[in-house]
Amino acid sequence: MYERALFAVWLLTLVLFQSAESCELRPVLAQVPKRLPAGYVISEGTEALTLKGCAVKPVAFTSSDPDFAVNADGTIITVRGLVITTKRFYVLVQDESGLDWRVDIMLSCKDEKSSSVAHKRIKRRWRPLPFSFIENDSPPFPKDLEMIASDSSVNYTVYYQISGQGVTTDPVGLFQLDGKNGMLKVTRAVDREQYPQFKFIARAYDISGKEVDEFLPITVNVEDKNDNAPVFIGGRLFSVEERCRAGTFIGQVNATDKDLANTKHTLIKFTLLNATDMFSIDPFTGTLTAKTNNLNREAQDKVYVNIEIRDMGGEPAGLFNTGTIVITLTDVNDNPPAFKEKLYKANVKENQENVLVTRITVEDKDLVNTPNWTALFEVTKGNESGQFRMETDPQTNEGLLYVIKGLDFEKTPVVKLEITARNPVPLVGTNATWLSVPLELSVGDEDEGPEFNPDILYLKVKENVPNGTVIGTYKALDPETKNSNGIKYYKLTDPGNWITVVESTGELRTANTIDRESPLVHQDKYNITIRAVDESKKTGRGMVIILIQDENDNIPAIPGTDMVICSKGDAVSSVLVEAVDLDKPPFSTPFIFEFGAEHDGKWKLKDTTDSSVVLEQVVPLPNDLYSVPLLVKDLQGFGKEQTVNVRVCSCEREENGVGLCGARSASTSLGSLGILALVLSSLLLLLLCLLLIFICSTKRDKLYINDDTGTGGMLLKSNTEAPGEEVKDGALMIIPGTDAMDGSLQSGAMVTKNVTSSAGNIGQQFFQGGGVYNTTTQDFGKENYYTSGRYNSLYGNAGNFQKFSNTSALDTWNTNGRYLERKLSYFGGEEDGRYADDLLKTYGNEGAGSPAGSVGCCSNLGEPESLDFLSTLGPKFRPLADVCYTTK
């Protein structure tokens, strides 16, 4: 039987071979560029690969070169870029009957000659269709698959060999071939999921071992068998908000099947096994969605859903698996805080402040410690006066009610409130609203002190009202009795002591002048506080604010009347004069500026504003001090004449826009030499004392002096610094010098009976030297001393001296030192005529201001003068005066 079947197959093959013997396939000859890009077309259409003369049509093409591919219409194209000179490969063309026809493809560069290509007649080759067998087939093994044969067996006695995957490579020995008859066998079961296809080759040899045909490629497909159940892949934890809309996407459930793709073996169907009222799943995509609008986290926050996955499209014969997914419902604020009581009650004593009254408990079903759960409390009714405050206890979520302003039992014994609780975030997915609850707060009675009504009393009073004027009455009431019986009133604060309070009645009277311009008044208001004391010694406090009305009790005044104008040569100069008035409009600005009656015409007014005017020179004035009378009046015409002293000078510099005259600048510059002058003067004083001690201790005991009057005198040696007992007559007096305006020094001459000396008037900064002895003329005359190399300038009216600090102490000491040196040198001479020079002098102009009084010709015959004036010379000069003016 087997031999008959084999003969039939051979006979059929022979018939087909003979019927196709007339088919001729010409090779494809093509000239192409040397560089071929990917996708380059070698031949187009079926013209090159047409089975001419054959009754069958090509249905499949296979290229032997992987660099080339053949489309379904027979077009040959390059798969990748190539560089060639010549190229040869073939294409297997499979016809409708399953026969393979070989077509040679020969490529050459366009510059090569194509005449050398020989035309070759190609005969058909037979190849069986791909073999197949079912995976995981049951024994016994080996099992026959197919028989292979070569057309060379017609001319030769051949035997076959196979090699490749499944034969000589892994999995080795899976296929066997009967070399004589070409029967292909499989030796064991194969898992398609591991080896879906095998490709190997068969070769034909004659008895001499020569290969008599081209090798035959053989393909063996492993047919799929539904032997794998689907399995879940990916995550199985999902979440969705509660109260979401039906159809809301939740997640994607994924599964896979190892069987052959795109077959019913891998067509998976998803089915929910529970929670079908809450969720739904697409049977073939695994998309999970919400099925209802009423998902409630408070009822169930996690839902465990069982899902079946079955292949074969869900057919009962399909393989399946089951698994569980977890869907977490996330919280939304769908529950408002709910009060546990329908009415809350609490108690508090009156007048208590900042105390906790009660705790209000609520319940919220939303997720704890989230904004959906946290409660915020508010007093929505009964808190119009702001007496209550509510807070939330973060631990217990309770509402805390505080009284921040004391309550009054007499006014309201029971306070009715409404408390509302809400969350920080709005409600979602529910028709519920925020809830409220009533609260009754009972106020406990307390014995209280008097209360003023109103708490703050405003009184309008004009300033400068007479003392004792009644400006108002401020009374307090007892909260319990509602009367003022037995209440006494006292002041607590009254900064200016302007008001008195009648103790029994609370009447307010003025005690001192009320001045709106006082620094105690702020924005025309003056505050006092009153205390009320009842019979039980309980107290109350009230405030009185006095609104002071302005009166025209101030006139405009120029605060700075001494001004400086810098001289500008031939140009006129000016200065801004400003005035102030402590009153308010209309009793103050705008001011009226006019010149006074004694105006000399040297100045004019311009650029007048509400409170200032510019004072300008009519013509340039020389440097001097000028007095300008100005009349400044307020809007009501009240004012007075004021004098502005304007100094015109040559300014060395300006500070803050104000010019500084030269003398003032010099004073500032000389101030740095003050310390040095004091040190040098001290050294000079010490030197003079040593010199006097030396002269007074000479061997001459007596020096006789002859004068015109016949009186005599002698100079006695004395080692004491103060007058001794030998001073019998106080004939010491000061002869002041004449006034001077030339910057010279002012000095008086101190005269004694025997010795006449001259010393500077210590304490003055400008001196006139008078009675100074001249060694050249041997006469007492007048000598001017200069300081700092120039005369000092004096300002002011004639006969008035102005003191300046620019004369240094060093100049004063130098002057005294020069005079003493000359005087001592004179007395040390041997001339007889010197006695005549040391006589009492008579002066025609004695001057004024001398502490010794008149120094006329008979002054020394009057009452003895006191030596108290020596104390005016200062501590530094007193020892020197005692030494020089002592007469024994």
Image (cartoon, grey):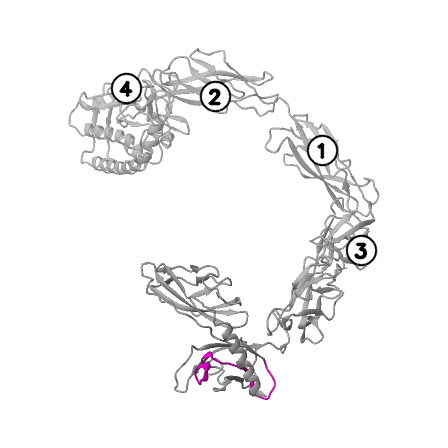
Residue at 56% x, 19% y: name it: 590
Give the number of the disc on residue 346.
Answer: 3
How far apart are labels 1 and 3 at the CA level? 38 Å
Quadrant location, the C terminus: top left
How far apart are labels 3 and 2 at the CA level? 72 Å
Residue closest to the eye, 165 or 687: 165
Q: Position of residue 771 (x, y in %)?
A: 27, 22
> Which mark lies nearer to you, 3 or 4?
3
Q: Check disc 2 and report its element: helix, strand or loop.
A: strand
Q: Which amino acid type is shown beneath numbered disc 4?
A: Lys
Choose top left, top right, bottom left or bottom right for residue 340.
Answer: bottom right
Q: Check disc 4 and report its element: helix, strand or loop.
A: loop
> Which mark lies nearer to you, 3 or 2?
3
**Position of 19 compared to 65: left or right?**
right
First to last magenta residue range: 135-162
> Which mark lies nearer to you, 2 or 4?
2
Task: Say which residue label 1 marks.
Answer: 458
Let me know if residue 146 is in the magenta part: yes
**Above/below status of 667 relative to 230:** above
Q: Which amino acid type is shown beneath numbered disc 1?
A: Tyr
Q: Which amino acid type is shown beneath numbered disc 2?
A: Val
Task: Say which residue label 2 marks.
Answer: 577
Which of the marked residues, 3 or 4, is nearer the chain's N terminus? 3
**Position of 724 compared to 528: left or right?**
left
Choose top left, top right, bottom left or bottom right for residue 800.
Answer: top left
Q: Check disc 3 and report its element: helix, strand or loop.
A: strand
Which of the marked residues, 1 or 4, is nearer the chain's N terminus? 1
